[in-house]
Amino acid sequence: MTRTKQNIETDFFRQLDRFTFSVRKRVSTVYAGNRPSTRSGHGIDTIGFREYDLNDSLKDIDWKAYARTEKLYVRQFEEEKTLTTHILLDASKSMDYPEKGTSKFEYAAMLAAGYAYMVTKYNDRFAISTFAQEIDIHKPSRGRKNLLRAIDRLTELELSGSTSIGEAVIKYSREIKSRSLVILISDFLQEPDAIETAVSRLSDHDLILIQVLDPTEKVLPIQGNSKLIDLETGEEVRTYVSEKFKERYLKKLDDHSARIKKACMKTGAEFYTFTTDTPIFDAFYYTIRRRRR
């Protein structure tokens, strides 16, 4: 059964207010290290002094330096870069699971909305784009109105098709104009080669991958003669689920996740896995706490 409306809760937003600075601090250092610029006046860190000239404002003069040297100097600061956050959200049919309760897509959409909410605290630009076989690209914009429009769009979204993460990232990467924070949210139940290619293509950015799974996908709580359905293709497979079958399945799932994690470690990206029974605030707390280290 296809959902007519996605249930995306936002009550947890207020709990995220305490974490905005931590996320901002991490991303700011990425920007400053990439392409520093200098200016007199306000900024992040003092990186030196230069002699005053007629184009400088008198308020920028360092009078303590003048007292020591009897020459006019102004401080030089590293200029803070504008943060842009790009959130890519898997909207393929495999995310429309299970039929009852919180689906993988609904949980993933709440993660996407939560990160966007934190970005709005600094009035920075963000975009939430969805992908399956094709990608629906949205341009980065600022403000709470942009966030509310994005949530409304996700609420009305009908999930369909299979996932083409490689093609989606190729197309989207052309839209990223400067080094950014990129958050990729999916169940990542695709060919690992495509995921590795996506990670490599986005490796110049501050990259976070978040895998969202249903609890049943982690334990496979079925036994005996069973009918398995591929949500993306509709293909049915009848098989006998034995304990040996479960062991092989869980081993393959663990190996798949380990391969993604290894690709992320090579490029300095972060990789997290959450099941939809994890309280949404706990998922944020874990990722943000890790980024403070």
Image (spheres, grey):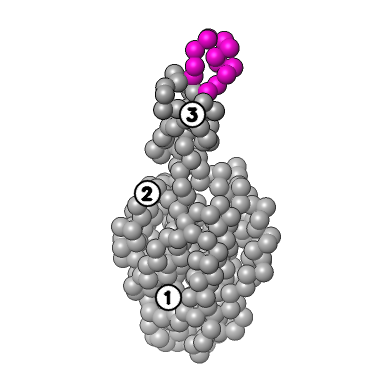
Q: Residue at x 49, y 19 (%)?
A: 73
Name the residue that disc number 3 marks. Answer: 57
Q: Is residue 229 visible?
A: yes
Q: Residues within 10 Å of mark 1 (few under 14, many from 20)?
A: many
Residue type at mark 1: give it: Ser
Residue extent of the magenta highlight: 61-73
Residue type at mark 3: give it: Ser
- Between 59 and 1, the one nearer to me in the picture: 59
Locate the C terminus and report the quarter of the image it occupies. top right
Question: Do callouts 3 and 1 mark residues in contact (Cβ within 8 Å)?
Answer: no
Q: Residue 195: x and y, percent? A: 38, 60
How far apart are labels 1 and 2 at the CA level?
Answer: 28 Å
How far apart are labels 2 and 3 at the CA level?
Answer: 30 Å
Q: Is residue 261 visible?
A: no
Circle 1: element type: loop
Q: Residue at x 34, y 65 (%)?
A: 168
How far apart are labels 3 and 1 at the CA level?
Answer: 55 Å
Magenta stretch holds residue 67: yes
Q: Residue at x 54, y 44 (%)?
A: 26
Give residue 63's quadrant in the image.
top right
Q: Residues within 10 Å of mark 2 (few under 14, many from 20)?
A: few
Disc number at residue 92? Answer: 1
